[in-house]
Image (tube, helix red, strand yellow):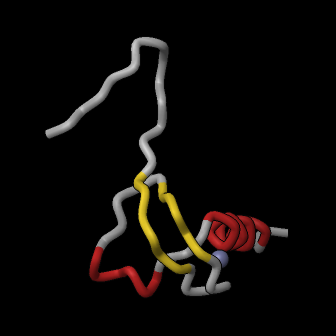
């Protein structure tokens, strides 16, 4: 296991890869989580992800 720890504070780990957003077909080169191989065709880029969250919260209006 290669685990690196930086002395100065918290650094978010990003996973590098070569994926595609299922919604807008944009290239995804890094993700804040390790993508599930079984769900690679459901991956969404950061923009689409955020949009989805905003939508569900906005329904209260
Ligand atoms: Zn997208």
Residue 34 at x, y = what percent? 34, 59
Image coordinates for residue 55, horizontal then vertical, percent: 73, 73
Q: How many numbered circles does the render carry?
A: 0
Does residue 30 appear left or right of residue 40 in this picture?
right
Quarter of the render that holds ligand 1: bottom right
- Find residue 41 and report its horizontal and vertical position in percent: 43, 87
Depth check: give the residue in front, 4 or 35. 4
The quadrant in which the N terminus is found is top left
Question: Vertical placement of 14 versus 28: above or below?
Answer: above
Residue toward you, 4 or 51: 4
Task: Spot the residue most to the left.
Answer: 1
Residue 24 horizontal side relative to residue 10, left or right: right
Q: Position of residue 25 (x, y in %)?
A: 62, 85
> Which residue is located at x 59 percent, y 75 percent?
27
The residue lying at 60 percent from left, 70 percent from top is 45
Q: Residue furthest top?
A: 7
Say which quarter of the image contains residue 61. Answer: bottom right
Q: Please tell me which residue is depicted at 52% across the width and 64% down the height of the picture.
A: 29
In the displayed structure image, the side of residue 4 where residue 13 appears, left or right:
right
Q: Nearer the viewer, residue 8 or 50?
A: 8
Q: Residue at x 48, y 17 (%)?
A: 9
Residue 11 lies, with reference to residue 18, above or below; the image says above
């Amino acid at each position: 296991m290669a685990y690196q720890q930086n002395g100065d504070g918290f650094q978010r780990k990003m996973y590098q890869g070569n994926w595609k957003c299922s919604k807008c077909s944009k290239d995804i080169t890094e993700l804040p989580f390790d993508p599930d191989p079984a769900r690679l065709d459901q991956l969404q880029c950061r923009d689409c992800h955020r949009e989805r969250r905003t939508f569900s919260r906005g329904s209260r209006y």
